């Protein structure tokens, strides 16, 4: 039973570029959440997707956008990259049960913006 | 008051020691709580869930005090392999809530 997978594992971009990160949820899971973790900080919620729609959003600018596909996989897009976007981007998945369910995290994508 | 606040750490303890981490949260409506463990440069992994007054799993005990909005994690008989960052996590909202993480408390267990 594959857990949450993410690609790529590492990425280096320059300021102003755009990036797309990918996530496949754990088998049986239909909800995907994305988090940003800066060095020395806890993960911060970016947004959550369920039934191919953004259901909740954290305090992130519109440069951060996402998508969920019919197979529940998801993408995170970041436009006009800033140096401050350098972080570990984590995807988490869970089953939607109408209440907060345990979220399982993928290994993350480490993004470096130069 | 921050939504989730943890002991800043780091904690440096010898093998066999008992160590306790504290966490406070601001949303009195929160119903469930989690402790995640994160190894260096790895993803967070669920350590314990807390839904009532507490939970125990082997050497690990989590306690919840709703009146004080306080959660603790106790590790007994520390092992070298317990070295990691421990994250206190509170879901925002009662349903499908996104997770609010504390900054984490780093634990180093020394021989």
Image (tube, coloured by chain):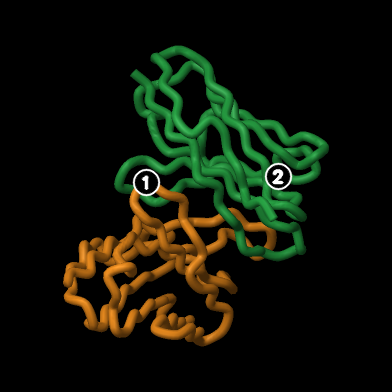
Q: Chain of mark 1?
A: B
| Residue ID for mark 1 | B41
For disc 2, the marked residue is A55
Dividing the image into 4 quarters, which one contains the N terminus of chain A? bottom right
Q: Would you say A78 lies left or right of B108 here?
A: right
Q: Nearer the viewer, residue B106 or A35?
A: B106
**Occupied quadrant, residue B61:** bottom left
- Report x, y in % for residue A31: 71, 49
The residue at the point 67 percent across, 41 percent down is: A24
Regarding residue B67, the answer to whether it shows in the image is: no
Q: Which chain is drawn using orange?
A: B
Marks 1 and 2 sit apart, C-alpha to C-alpha, by 29 Å
Query: Residue A63 location, x and y as percent?
Result: 54, 24
Q: Which chain does green denote in the image? A: A
Q: Residue A42 appears at what percent x and percent y?
A: 39, 51
Q: Position of residue A79 (x, y in %)?
A: 53, 19
Q: Chain of mark 2?
A: A
State which quarter of the image contains the C terminus of chain A. Answer: top left
Q: Counting other residues with Cα less than 10 Å from the Cα at mark 1, is it few (<14), some (14-19), or many (20 or more)?
A: few
Instruction: Report the disc number at residue A85.
Output: none
Q: Looking at the image, can residue A23 be seen?
A: yes
Looking at the rendered image, the disc whose residue lies closer to the viewer, 1 or 2, is 1
Helix, strand or loop at mark 2: strand
Left/right placement of residue A109 relative to residue A33 reads left
The one of B81 and B50 positioned closer to us in this rendering? B81
**Location of residue B91 with respect to B73 vertically, above or below:** above
Give the class, few, some or many, for how many residues have Cα within 10 Å of label 2's Cα (few <14, many ≥20): some
Q: Nearer the viewer, residue B6 or A95?
A: A95
């Amino acid at each position: 039973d594959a857990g949450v997978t993410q690609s790529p594992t590492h990425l280096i971009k320059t300021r102003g570029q755009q990036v797309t990160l990918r996530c496949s949820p754990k088998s049986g899971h239909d909800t995907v959440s994305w988090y940003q973790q800066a060095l020395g900080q806890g993960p911060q919620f970016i947004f959550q997707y369920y039934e191919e729609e953004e259901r909740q959003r954290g305090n992130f600018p519109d440069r951060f956008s996402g998508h969920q596909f019919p197979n529940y996989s998801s993408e995170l897009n970041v436009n006009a990259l800033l140096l401050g976007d350098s972080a570990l981007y984590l995807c988490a998945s869970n089953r939607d049960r109408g209440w907060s369910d345990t979220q399982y995290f993928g290994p993350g994508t480490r993004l470096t913006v130069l | 008051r921050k939504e989730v606040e943890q002991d800043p750490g780091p904690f440096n303890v010898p093998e066999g020691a008992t160590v306790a981490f504290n966490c406070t949260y601001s949303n009195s409506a929160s119903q469930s709580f989690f402790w995640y463990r994160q190894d260096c440069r790895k993803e967070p992994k669920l350590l314990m869930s807390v839904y009532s007054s507490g939970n125990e799993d082997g050497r690990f005990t989590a306690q919840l005090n709703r009146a004080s909005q306080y959660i603790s994690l106790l590790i007994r008989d520390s092992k070298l392999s317990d070295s990691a960052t421990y994250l206190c996590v509170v879901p925002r909202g009662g349903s499908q809530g996104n997770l609010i993480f504390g900054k984490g408390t780093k634990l180093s267990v020394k021989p």
